[in-house]
Amino acid sequence: MDVYKTIVVGLFGALLGSQLPIPLAELFAAALVVVAYLRLTKKNLRLPTAVLTTIQIILGVSIGITVQLSELIDSFSMPLFVGLILCMLSQTSVNFVWLYKKEKWTPFESLLGAIPGAMAAILMISEEQQKPSPKIIFSHSIRLLLLVVLAGFIATTGDGTSQLSQTLSPSQIPHLALLALASYLLGKAVGKIGVPAPFLLTSLLVAALYNAQFPTLQLVIPESLIMVATAILGVLIGSRLAPTTLKQALEYSKAGFIVTLLGVSVTVFYAWLFSSLTGTDWEVLLLAWVPGSVEAMTAVALLLGLEPAFVAINHVMRLMMLYMMPVVLKSPLQRLSRIKDLF
């Protein structure tokens, strides 16, 4: 019963946040309200598996239906794809070294805290551990907050439209139900072989393939469902932040701030390097490769006339690779979770 009460509190916070002209304000408002609620009631909360599964499916499908495989193929450039991968690997490596060497985090915490983006996937992997670490949540929350707010102040001044503003047609409901069912069944099967965040991965792939097969459907996720998923994700964040002391919060926030600066610095370097090699505007590459919000970065590119389609496609590719990263890193992640020191 406490779980559902807290989710309602988180939904209330998300509704309040939706009134703010800041991207993802719902997420952070829900988290803050839940932190206040759990501290006042002195409760300790862990979300059940069914709730986490629901979040993964909603978020995975919402991203997957935006993927246009034809656009991915048309905009594909091997040199820039290599640049994207090198940029992501460098961001992760630099952040990992800082968190492990300077902040004295464990190898497992350092890796999850260092991966640039895909906050939902990282939270799901963290939540699968017996004792989810608040350090990881702080690191990603601060990074997301800084990048989204900075881009959001520019993005919200324009006329860009979001897929959430589109109207859901009743004829789309059976298609979405089929996607949810297929994602759940495949996620159960994939989860049995130990893949982290299985429902997030399968729902993204199923939705992307379905969208490619039926491109004229123009599927959209109801805004109310996105709001619920965002609120629950805020509850998850808030429930992990609530037991944290002020000293720990400041320490973890500092780490998140530093790795954000390091990640952006690495992105600036690679944007300049591959701009020199390929002739692509470095500002375009910066917006395409910075580990920020897809919606906000695309809106900024639209306002500044910096190839918004290219920016959006690169962020989709980045997210897809990040969501698949836990599958590739399954064995290293399992080993790291049992190691306290690499040396």
Image (spheres, rainbow, N blue to C red):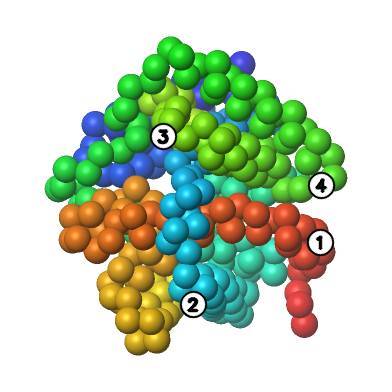
Q: Residue 313 appears at what percent x and percent y?
A: 42, 55
Question: Is 167 placed above or below 118 here?
Answer: above
Q: Residue 58 appears at what percent x and percent y?
A: 54, 31
What number is the disc on residue 331? 1
Cα gap from disc 3 to disc 1, whole angstroms: 34 Å
What number is the disc on residue 30? 3
Residue behind mark 4:
194
Q: Is 180 left or right of 306, judged from the image as shown?
A: right
Helix, strand or loop status at disc 2: helix
Question: Is 329 placed above or below 33 here?
Answer: below
Pick whichever of labels 3 and 2 is earlier in the sequence: 3
**Mark 2 touches mark 4? (CB < 8 Å):** no
**Could one spot residue 206 in this view of the protein?**
yes
Q: Residue 114 appears at what percent x and percent y?
A: 56, 66
Cα gap from disc 2 to disc 4, whole angstroms: 34 Å
Residue shown at 76% from the left, 48% from the top: 195
What number is the disc on residue 79? 2
Kindly identify the amino acid type of the residue bearing the numbered disc 2.
Answer: Pro
